[in-house]
Image (cartoon, rainbow, N blue to C red):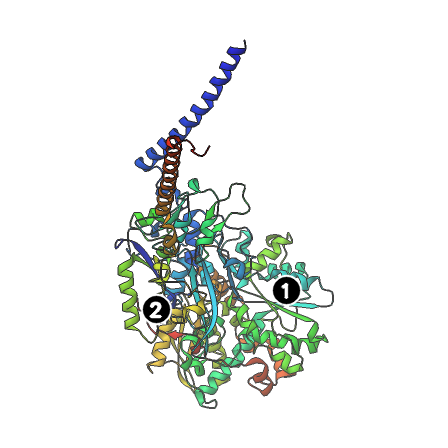
C-alpha cells in the first residue's frame, strides 16, 4: 500500500513537470510557426477601415475627383449649423457655394481671420442628408411667447406664403397667406404683420433714390443696386467693395419693418419699445445675419435706449413649420385670416418681391409714377423680360421726361459676378440692377422648405407663378397705392428720404475686403 | 525606406472645413458621440479613442494682424517610432509602407506606448472592460493599395497631400523656395524625432500652433538603444564573468583540497 501510494505521488510530480515542459515547447512552436507564416504580422484588415467612404474618394493614387470635401462653417455662424453625425462628404455644399454662389474658391489662401460665408444657406438646400441646417431660434420665440410682459409681433416675408404649405403636404407654390396668419395667431403672437408693408415702403424709398440718382440730386453712382438681399450685400462687401456706393442706401424690408415696429408702431399702439419682441419669418438664413449687424439698431438710437435691436429674432420658413408642428397646429385645416392693421397692408408690387425680377418690376411701376405723376402703362404691370429663371435678364422701358430706363436683374452670385464685372469695367448701360443672392429669388431662399433637394426649377417656377398670380389678382399693384404706407408718411416720416426716413430706413455698408484676399476669377 | 509613404499638411491651405475629421470617422467606422452638436468647440477638438484626427483652431498674431490658423492633428507616424520600440508585445509596428499601426490582438494594455510617444497621441479606452489603445492608423489598407488616406482623399483645398515621403519633402522645399515670404523655412517632421511620415508646412512659427518644438531630432528609440544595446553583452559578459569566477573558485578549492590531502601530516604534533 505504502509503496504504491508513494509511487503514485512520484508519477504525479513527473506529470506536472512534463506538462510544463510541453507547454513551454508548444508556445515556442506556435511563436515560431506564427512568425514564419506571418500570422503575427499586421494584416491590413485589422487596422481601421471598418467603415466606408463615398465612391468618389475610392480611387487610386492622386487621381482627381469631381468634388471633394465640404464648405467650412464656423461654429458661431449666426445663420447655419452643421451636424457632423449626418455629413456624408458628398461635396454638394461645396458645389453650390463655388459654382452657384461663387464664394468658395474665390479667395486666396491662407485665410485671414474669418470663414468667408455670405450666410445665404444655399448649402443647406443642397445637403442631401440634412447635415447643414438653419441655426434654430425657435426656442427663443417660444420663450418670448410665454412671457406675459412681452408684446411679441411678427412680420412675414413675401415668399414664405407660397412655400410654407409644402411643409404640410400641399403642392409646391400653394398660396397659404391667410392660413399662415391664422397659424401665427394660434401660436400666440400679439400682432401678425406683413413684411409686404415695408416692401412697399422700400419701393417708395428706393424708387425715390433711383430718380434722385438719375436726376443728379443725389450724388451717387449709377447703376443703383438693390439692397434687400442680405447675402448679396455681404457678397458685395467681400468681393466688390469698390462698388458699395452703387448699393441703394435703403435697408431691406425686414430691417425697415424692424426699425418702424419699435418706433412708429410702438408710438401708435402705445406700447413701450423695450417690451416689444420683434420677430420675423423669412425664406432666408442671411436675414439672421442681417438682423445681427451692429448698425441695425436705429430704434435704439431713436429712443436713446441701449440694447434695443430692430429685429430681435429671425425665423426661417422651416423653423416656423417646426414650431407649428410642435404645437400640433395643422396649417391645412385653418381658416384664412387677415393681417393686423397699421403695418399689415400690401400691394401686388410687394408680393412679387419674393421673385427674381420682382423688386425691379415693383420699383419701375412706382418710379414711373414718381417721375411722371401718372400711373404706369400696362407694360409696367407685366414686365415680362425681367420675369423667369434666366440668370441675367435685361429690360428697357420708356419713361416720359426721363428717357429710356435700362435695367438688369440677376440671381445667384455667379450670375451676379457677370453684371458686377461689367459695371466695374464701365461697360454697364443700366440705371438700376436687381441682385438676388439665391437662384430664383427669395422663393428659393436658403430658409425655405426642402421640397426638392437640391432645389429644382419646377418647384421654383410653381412658387414664382403663385406670386405673380396673386399680384395679378389684386386691384392695387403699385407700392404708392398702399394706404398704410401713405399714412406712415403723413403721420410720421413726412415724405420719402426725409430726415427721419434717412435715420430709420437707410443704412450704409462697409468693405469686408480686409477679410479675404479676393480672386476675381476662379483659378484651379 | 525611400519607398515609404507620407503626407504633407500645408497649414496655409487649411480652411477648417473638417472634411478630414469626418472622413476619418466614416472610413474607420468610429463611433460618433450623440451629443456632438452640443459639445463645446474645445471638447470637439480633442483627440479621443473614437476621434483619431481633429483640427485645432488657433487665433494668433501675424505681422501685427489677427489671423486664424488650423492644424490637423493625428499620429505623425515616426520613421523610428518610440511607441513600437516601447511595445514589448509587438502590438505597435512600423510598416514598410509608412503607417505605424496598432494591433489590438497583441496588446496587453500596458500603455508604455502612451508614455513613450513624444507627441502624446495614443488614447486609451479607460471606460471599457477590455480597453484598447487607439490612434490614427494612416489607413494602412488604402495606403498599401496606393490610395490616399481617407482624410487626404477628401481635402477640398489640397492642404493634405499624399505621396512618397522623399517626393513630398522635395515638394515642400520647392513650395518654400517659391514663396519664401509666406512660409516659415522649416518642414516640421523632416527631422523631428528622427523624422516622421507626416510633414507640415506653415506660415507662422510652429511653436505658436501647438507643435512641440523641443522634440529632439534623434530618434527616440536611439536613447534607450544607447543603454539597451549593451543588454546581450552584459547578459553574456556577466554570465561569463560569474562562470569564470565559479571556475576559478572551484579550481582553487580543488587545488586547496588536493594540497590539503597531500600535505604532510603535521610534524609538530
Location of residue A353 in the rendering, given as x and y in whole percent from the top left corner: 50, 70
Q: Which residue occupies the extreme top position in the image?
A: A1
Location of residue A309 in the rendering, given as x and y in whole percent from the top left corner: 62, 74
Q: Residue at x 67, y 62 (%)?
A: A143
Asked if both marks, 1 and 2, belong to the same chain, the answer given is no
Left or right, A158 with reference to A514: right
Q: Is residue A264 above or below residue A123?
A: below
Q: CA distance from mark 1 to mark 2?
A: 69 Å
**Neighbours of disc 2 within 10 Å: few (<14), some (14-19), many (20+):** some
Q: Which residue occupies the extreme front position in the image?
A: B268
Mark 2 secondary-structure assignment:
loop
Quarter of the figure with residue B12: bottom left
Left or right, A82 with reference to A321: left
Inspect this view and state whether residue A453 appears: no
Left or right, A450 with reference to B205: right
Location of residue B201 in the rendering, given as x and y in whole percent from the top left corner: 36, 66
Q: Nearer the viewer, residue A171 or B102?
A: B102
Mark 1 secondary-structure assignment:
loop
Q: Is residue A41 above or below residue A291?
A: above
In contact (CB < 8 Å): disc 1 and disc 2: no
Q: Nearer the viewer, residue A30 or A202?
A: A30
Q: Residue at x 46, y 57 (%)?
A: B120
Q: Mark 1 or 2, which is nearer the eye?
A: 2
**Neighbours of disc 1 within 10 Å: few (<14), some (14-19), many (20+):** some
* Labelled disc at residue A245: none
The residue labelled by disc 2 is: B186
Location of residue A254 in the rendering, given as x and y in whole percent from the top left corner: 56, 72
Quarter of the figure with residue A140: bottom right
The chain that hosts pointer 1 is: A
The chain that hosts pointer 2 is: B
Q: Nearer the viewer, residue B212 or B179?
A: B212
* Labelled disc at residue A338: 1
Amino acid at each position: 500500500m505504502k509503496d504504491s501510494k508513494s509511487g503514485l505521488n512520484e508519477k504525479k510530480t513527473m506529470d506536472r513537470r512534463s506538462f510544463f515542459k510541453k507547454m513551454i515547447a508548444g508556445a515556442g512552436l506556435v511563436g515560431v510557426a506564427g512568425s514564419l507564416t506571418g500570422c503575427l504580422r499586421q494584416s491590413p484588415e485589422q487596422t481601421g477601415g471598418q467603415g466606408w467612404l463615398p465612391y468618389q474618394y475610392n480611387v487610386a493614387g492622386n487621381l482627381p475627383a469631381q468634388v471633394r470635401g465640404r464648405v467650412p462653417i464656423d461654429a458661431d455662424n449666426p445663420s447655419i449649423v452643421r451636424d457632423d453625425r449626418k455629413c456624408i462628404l458628398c461635396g454638394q455644399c461645396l458645389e453650390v457655394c463655388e459654382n452657384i454662389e461663387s464664394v468658395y474658391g474665390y479667395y486666396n489662401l491662407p485665410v485671414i481671420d474669418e470663414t468667408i460665408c455670405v450666410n445665404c444657406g444655399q448649402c443647406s438646400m443642397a445637403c442631401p442628408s440634412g447635415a447643414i441646417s438653419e441655426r434654430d431660434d425657435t426656442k427663443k420665440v417660444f420663450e418670448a411667447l410665454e412671457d406675459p410682459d412681452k408684446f411679441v409681433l411678427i412680420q412675414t416675408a413675401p415668399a414664405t406664403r407660397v412655400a410654407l404649405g409644402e411643409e404640410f403636404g400641399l403642392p409646391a407654390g400653394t398660396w397659404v397667406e391667410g392660413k399662415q396668419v391664422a397659424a401665427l395667431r394660434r401660436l400666440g403672437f400679439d400682432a401678425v404683420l406683413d413684411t409686404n408693408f415695408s416692401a412697399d415702403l422700400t419701393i417708395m424709398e428706393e424708387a425715390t433714390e433711383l430718380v434722385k440718382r438719375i436726376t443728379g440730386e443725389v450724388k451717387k453712382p449709377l447703376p443703383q443696386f438693390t439692397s434687400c438681399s442680405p447675402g448679396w450685400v455681404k457678397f458685395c462687401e467681400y468681393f466688390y467693395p469698390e462698388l458699395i456706393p452703387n448699393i441703394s442706401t435703403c435697408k431691406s424690408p425686414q430691417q425697415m419693418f424692424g426699425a418702424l415696429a419699435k418706433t412708429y408702431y410702438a408710438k401708435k399702439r402705445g406700447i413701450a419699445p423695450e417690451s416689444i419682441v420683434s420677430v420675423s419669418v423669412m425664406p432666408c438664413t442671411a436675414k439672421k445675419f442681417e438682423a445681427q449687424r451692429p448698425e441695425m439698431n436705429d430704434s435704439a438710437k431713436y429712443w436713446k435706449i441701449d440694447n434695443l435691436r430692430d429685429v430681435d429674432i429671425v425665423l426661417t420658413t422651416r423653423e416656423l413649420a417646426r414650431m407649428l408642428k410642435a404645437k400640433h397646429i395643422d396649417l391645412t385645416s385653418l381658416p384664412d385670416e387677415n393681417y393686423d392693421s397699421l403695418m399689415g397692408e400690401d400691394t401686388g408690387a410687394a408680393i412679387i418681391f419674393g421673385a427674381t425680377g420682382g423688386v425691379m418690376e415693383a420699383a419701375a411701376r412706382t418710379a414711373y409714377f414718381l417721375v411722371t405723376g401718372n400711373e404706369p402703362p400696362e407694360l409696367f404691370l407685366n414686365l415680362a423680360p425681367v420675369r423667369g429663371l434666366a440668370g441675367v435678364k435685361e429690360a428697357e422701358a420708356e419713361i416720359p421726361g426721363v428717357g429710356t430706363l435700362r435695367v438688369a436683374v440677376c440671381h445667384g452670385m455667379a450670375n451676379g459676378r457677370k453684371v458686377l464685372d461689367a459695371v466695374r469695367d464701365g461697360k454697364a448701360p443700366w440705371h438700376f440692377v436687381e441682385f438676388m443672392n439665391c437662384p430664383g429669388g427669395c422663393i428659393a431662399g436658403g430658409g425655405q422648405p426642402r421640397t426638392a433637394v437640391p432645389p429644382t426649377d419646377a418647384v421654383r417656377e410653381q412658387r414664382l407663378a403663385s406670386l405673380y398670380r396673386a399680384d395679378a389678382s389684386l386691384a392695387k399693384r403699385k407700392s404708392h397705392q398702399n394706404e398704410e404706407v401713405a399714412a406712415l408718411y403723413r403721420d410720421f416720416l413726412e415724405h420719402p428720404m426725409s430726415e427721419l426716413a434717412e435715420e430709420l430706413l437707410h443704412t450704409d455698408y462697409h468693405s469686408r475686403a480686409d477679410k479675404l484676399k479676393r480672386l476675381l476669377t476662379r483659378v484651379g | 525606406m525611400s519607398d515609404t509613404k507620407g503626407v504633407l499638411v500645408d497649414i496655409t491651405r487649411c480652411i477648417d472645413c473638417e472634411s478630414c475629421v469626418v472622413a476619418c470617422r466614416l472610413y474607420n467606422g468610429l463611433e460618433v458621440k450623440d451629443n456632438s452638436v452640443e459639445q463645446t468647440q474645445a471638447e470637439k477638438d480633442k483627440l479621443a479613442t473614437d476621434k483619431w484626427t481633429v483640427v485645432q483652431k488657433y487665433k494668433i498674431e501675424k505681422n501685427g494682424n489677427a489671423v486664424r490658423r488650423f492644424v490637423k492633428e493625428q499620429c505623425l507616424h515616426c520613421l523610428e517610432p518610440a511607441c513600437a520600440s516601447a511595445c514589448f508585445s509587438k502590438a505597435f509596428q512600423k510598416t514598410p509602407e509608412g503607417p505605424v499601426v496598432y494591433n489590438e490582438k497583441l496588446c496587453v494594455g500596458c500603455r508604455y506606448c502612451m508614455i513613450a510617444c513624444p507627441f502624446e497621441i495614443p488614447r486609451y479606452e479607460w471606460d471599457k472592460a477590455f480597453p484598447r489603445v487607439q490612434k490614427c492608423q494612416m489607413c494602412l489598407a488604402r495606403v498599401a493599395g496606393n490610395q490616399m488616406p481617407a482624410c487626404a482623399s477628401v481635402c477640398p483645398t489640397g492642404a493634405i497631400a499624399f505621396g512618397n515621403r522623399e517626393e513630398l519633402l522635395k515638394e515642400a522645399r520647392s513650395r518654400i523656395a517659391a514663396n519664401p515670404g509666406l512660409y516659415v523655412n522649416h518642414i516640421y517632421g523632416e527631422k523631428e524625432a528622427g523624422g516622421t511620415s507626416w510633414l507640415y508646412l506653415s506660415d507662422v512659427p510652429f511653436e505658436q500652433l501647438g507643435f512641440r518644438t523641443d522634440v529632439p531630432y534623434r530618434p527616440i528609440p536611439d536613447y534607450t538603444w544607447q543603454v539597451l544595446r549593451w543588454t546581450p553583452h552584459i547578459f553574456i559578459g556577466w554570465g561569463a564573468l560569474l562562470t569564470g569566477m565559479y571556475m576559478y573558485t572551484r579550481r582553487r578549492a580543488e587545488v586547496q583540497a588536493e594540497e590539503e590531502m597531500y600535505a604532510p601530516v603535521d610534524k609538530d604534533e
